[in-house]
Amino acid sequence: MKFSCTQENLQQGLQVVSHGATKNVNLPILNNVLLKIEDKVLKLTTTNLEIAVSATVRGKAEQNGEYTIPSKLFADYVTLLPGGRVDMEQNEDKLKVETPAAKTTIKGIPASEFPLIPKLEARDSYRVPVADFRRAMAKVIFSVSPNEARPELSGVLLRFSPAGPSGTLTLAATDSYRLSETKIPLHEGAGLPERSVIIPARTMAELIRILGIFKEFPDAKATLAISVGDNQALFTYETVELISRTIEGKYPDYQAVIPENTKTTAVIKKDELAKAVKTSALFSRSGIFDVRLQVDAAGGRLLVRSTDSQTGENESALLAEIKGPDNTVTLNHRFLLEGLAAVEGEEVRLKLVDGMTPCVLEPSAAAAPFLYIVMPIKQ
């Protein structure tokens, strides 16, 4: 194999794929990046057996071939090279890398040992606006369960509903203690079937990282293509392909836990509430992380309280627009703060039923649809 390209193009390609490699003592090949020259381009690929990421690099191909070398070592080396031309050529069990000012050889492993990357055709793809997708994923991914005892909760639910003029993609995540849901329009997908798929949170985090690399490029594509197979999903953007396993199983019917009726509604300044919760968190009980929200309807206030026998107690009073009677609920302050951070706009609407029923947070103004539900701490 023999290929020439610019340092800038090669560095960008390695930046995209290098996180896909993983340290693995039993399978050293997983530490490597596959370099494959075919159809006049260099294709870089890494995998950890759950996710495979590939990116193509433009340049001059003189001889086809494929070889693998340590991903992190190669990425670090290319980053330190000056801008300009980089020549690469395989010589038996080494890859020779040369620039006008430097040369090196890197030992590798034959490409025949690299895992076979499954194929999933990009036909019949749903397309979503990239900016909307990145923003929506940031609103839900923090609610994914870190515990894989229930595998379906360790991923993000994507539900494609192409019906209507444009269709909708619903994203949801829950760890059974709180739930995030948001919706974005489909850019393309009319005529395709409705589908639901659970994507591992690790895949979503890697995809968001990759999309962030292209965020500052003025000519970057505006849409992301998503193709869903029987047990795989393919995400295609620019010259990048990310293919991942999907999580089998049925996602919980989370709609059943959304309260149908609300007794008390309070609209509060979001930043003021977040500051009050952070203050009360200093005095919450260790390991319980509890803060009490008490609605004072007559006074038009929301009281944020916490008490700990070891540290003391705290109370903050916030002006609020209240509808309904007095009400009280105790919540995990970490869950509450993460939900507040995901709400767009200056104000947040709290919906309460009682101290035993989930509390609902949502934007108070006409913003992108977002629903956040927190289970109460029962006293």
Image (cartoon, rainbow, N blue to C red):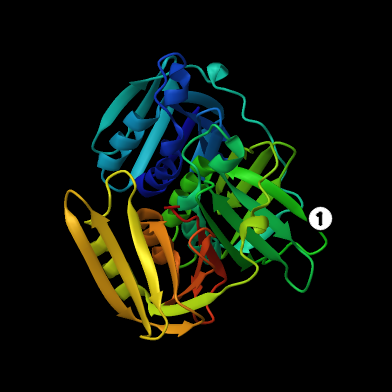
Location of mark 1 (residue): 193
Horizontal side of residue 76 vs 253, given as left or right: left
Q: Say which residue appears at 52% left-offset and 46% top-offset.
A: 175
Quadrant assignment, res 97: top left
Above-or-below relation of 51 to 104: below
Q: Identify which residue, 144 or 247, lies in the foreground.
A: 144
Q: Say which residue appears at 44% left-offset and 80% top-offset.
A: 267
Measured as percent of width and height from the top left, residue 168 is found at: 69, 65
| Number of marks in picture | 1
SS for dot 1: loop
Q: Residues within 10 Å of mark 1 (few under 14, many from 20)?
A: few
Above-or-below relation of 174 to 52: below
Measured as percent of width and height from the top left, residue 305 is found at: 29, 65
Q: Identify which residue, 134 or 300, lies in the foreground.
A: 300
Quadrant assignment, res 10: top left
Q: Say which residue appears at 52% left-offset and 33% top-offset.
A: 148
Residue type of the residue flagged with mark 1: Pro
Q: Identify which residue, 38 or 170, lies in the foreground.
A: 170
Residue furthest left as drawn = 311
Q: Say which residue appears at 70% left-offset and 42% top-offset.
A: 250
Horizontal side of residue 187 vs 61, given as left or right: right
Measured as percent of width and height from the top left, residue 207 is found at: 50, 48
Measured as percent of width and height from the top left, residue 171 is found at: 60, 57
Res. 98 visible in picture: yes
Res. 216 visible in picture: no
Q: Identify which residue, 56 or 309, lies in the foreground.
A: 309
